[in-house]
Each structure stands twice: as structure tokens, then as C-alpha cells.
Amino acid sequence: MNNEALKCILTRRSVRSFSGQSIGREELEKIAEAARLAPSAKNSQMWKFTVLQNKKLMKKLASVIAAQLGRGDDYDFYAPDTLIIVSCERDYAYNREDCACALENIFLAAHSLGIGSVWINQLNGICGVPRIREVLTELKIPSSQDVYGMAALGYPAEQAATVEKKEGNVEYIY
Amino acid sequence: MNNEALKCILTRRSVRSFSGQSIGREELEKIAEAARLAPSAKNSQMWKFTVLQNKKLMKKLASVIAAQLGRGDDYDFYAPDTLIIVSCERDYAYNREDCACALENIFLAAHSLGIGSVWINQLNGICGVPRIREVLTELKIPSSQDVYGMAALGYPAEQAATVEKKEGNVEYIY
């Protein structure tokens, strides 16, 4: 296939095991730009992208989530090099859709740079819990915003697992 | 930039004016494949992609939506060559997120093939209305599914408008 963009879309798989190699600032800026240029309803862009490479704060965020959800102390978002937290205005109708489009752009842009990624969903519905909001505030996420998804990013430690894709869910009507 | 995938992501813009040129089956299959390979929560794939090129049925769908929303008779989804209807199980927690990822893949795959696209949102929340459900059933969309977004697709009649993207919504925390 000589369509590299399509190839990128078709070969992206979630990666859950990362090497220790750090992602450079230049790559992170490209990935963040891909997120910013995602479509949003009426071009609202009611989102914010927090690119978190600080491991101490990442651990702190993981800890309060684990405590809230009853997960073990080893909960660490798959130990990524970088976590991109996608937040959006809570009182905005299309926050979930817009953030998902931005996240897909993040995953694809990362993949195009040889960086693996996986959607981390554990903040869904618990951003209002005081001990969690406290950490979000430390991460400069506005109090009017909730987190609608996170991307764990890192260079892959191993080839991504192949996942089964269902057949028969495309209908052509001419 | 020699990263064609990233270039595709960064140059995609919504297109709302289409030429009369028809999209071939080969292109539609590539676009549908991109949708199918989008990430979904726990690889659930609770979605269906209905690739509608039949203008009579497209008009019928537009008419019942227009009637429901009080839009004029000229409502036509921007008169695309093809409409891809993305539906998903109503009783599934991540229907909105998964369908948005699939739609973004559709937009990007289309753009990589020189095809323009725009998200059509008007079925949100009205799929249960009897006269609308009737048409969805005619389109073979299961009664357990609602539509979470549609992609209007066609070769662009003109260059997509540049839209303003906000600055200052990316935070780096090292």
C-alpha cells in the first residue's frame, strides 16, 4: 500500500507494554498538534491537553485513582513514558465525542512516529471526587473540566497484540 | 514533512461542499476498513457502519430528520455522494467514544484518498422517534442501536475553509 496515512490507520493497535525510552519534546509537540487539530462540534475546541511526563505526578494521579476504584498499589497506567490527559468542559454537549476524536488523532500521530499508545479510561465519572479533583487541580486542569480519556504513550516494549476484528458489521446500500 | 500520516491528520478539515463525482466501491471499502479498525473500549466493536449511496433513501432519511427538527425541505446533509451512518448499541457505556474514534478514522481515511467529509450530528437523541426509527429499520440498522454520528462524504467542490484553532490549550508538565 502506498497510502501511508491509511496504512497508519490500519496498523495501529493498542500498546500496553512500554520500553523505558523517553519521548522527545519534538515528538510530543507533533502529537499535541494532532490532538488540537481534531474536529470538534462547531469547532468548539472546549478541550485541554495536558502532556504529563513528570513521573511523580503521574504516580500521584494513579494512586488516587487506584484508591478510588479499589485497584492495587501497582496501578500505573501501564507505566507509560508520557500520559496525555484530555479534559473538556463538563457542561458541553459533545465533550465525549470531541475528546474521542482528539484521542484517536493522538494514537495515530504517535503510531506514525513509532510510539505506542493505549486509551486509559479510569477517570470516567470520578473527576468530582475531592481527592481526585485535588490532583487534577495540581495538574492545572480547570475545575469546570472533567477528564474524558487519557493516552498512555511510550515506545513499545514488544509488538502489539493482534486483536480480533468482527466481520459483518459493514452494510453497503446502493 | 515526510510523515504522510501526520500530514493527513494535520491537513484534514471539514468539507461541506461536494462535487457530483461518485466515490468508487474500492475507496468506500478502504474507508469502512479504517472505521472497523478504530479502537473501541475492550475491543467491544458494538458498532455498525452503514455505507449509504442510495440517493432516494438518503433523501428519505434527510426528510424525516428535517421534519423532526423543523428544518427546511432543503435539508440534505450537504448533498454528499455517500453517507456513512455509524450506529452502536444503545445500552453500551462507550458508544459515543467508540463511534467518534471510528468517525475520525473515516474522516482521515477519506482525506488520504482526496475525499472530503464532515460530521453530521442531527440524529442525536431522536433515533427513538417512530418515523425516524422506521427509516433506520429500512436501512437495516438494528433496533437495539442508535446512531451516534454520520459522515457525509464526497469529492470536494472547493477547498475546505480554514478554521481558527485556539492557542494555549496544551500544557506540558515535566
Image (cartoon, coloured by chain):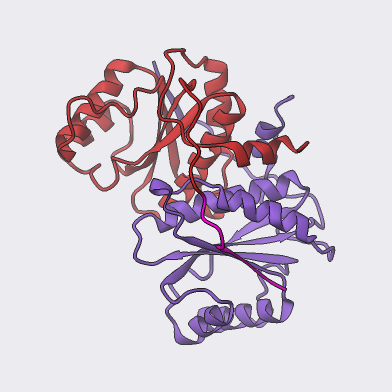
Chain colours: A red, B purple
Q: Position of residue A54 (x, y in %)?
A: 35, 17
The C terminus of chain A sits in image quarter = bottom right
Q: Position of residue A148 (x, y in %)?
A: 37, 44
For this rendering, which residue is in front, B38 or B73? B38
Residue at image position (76%, 47%) is B113
Residue at image position (61%, 79%) is B61
Horizontal side of residue B136 vs A122, given as left or right? right
Q: Position of residue B173 (x, y in %)?
A: 39, 20
- Prevailing SS of the magenta stretch: loop
Residue B154 highlighted magenta (yes or no): no
Horizontal side of residue A147 vs B35, given as left or right? left
**Residue B166 seen:** no
Residue A166 highlighted magenta (yes or no): yes
Range drawn in magenta: A165-174
Q: How many marks?
A: 0
The answer to whether A137 is drawn above or below residue B23 in the figure is above
The N terminus of chain A sits in image quarter = top right
Residue at image position (56%, 63%) is A168
**Residue A114 seen:** yes
For this rendering, which residue is in front, A173 or A102? A173
For this rendering, which residue is in front, A121 or A155? A155
Residue at image position (41%, 51%) is A96
Horizontal side of residue A67 vs A157, given as left or right? left
The answer to whether A86 is drawn above or below residue B50 in the figure is above
**Residue B54 sits in quarter:** bottom right
Q: Position of residue B74 (x, y in %)?
A: 69, 79
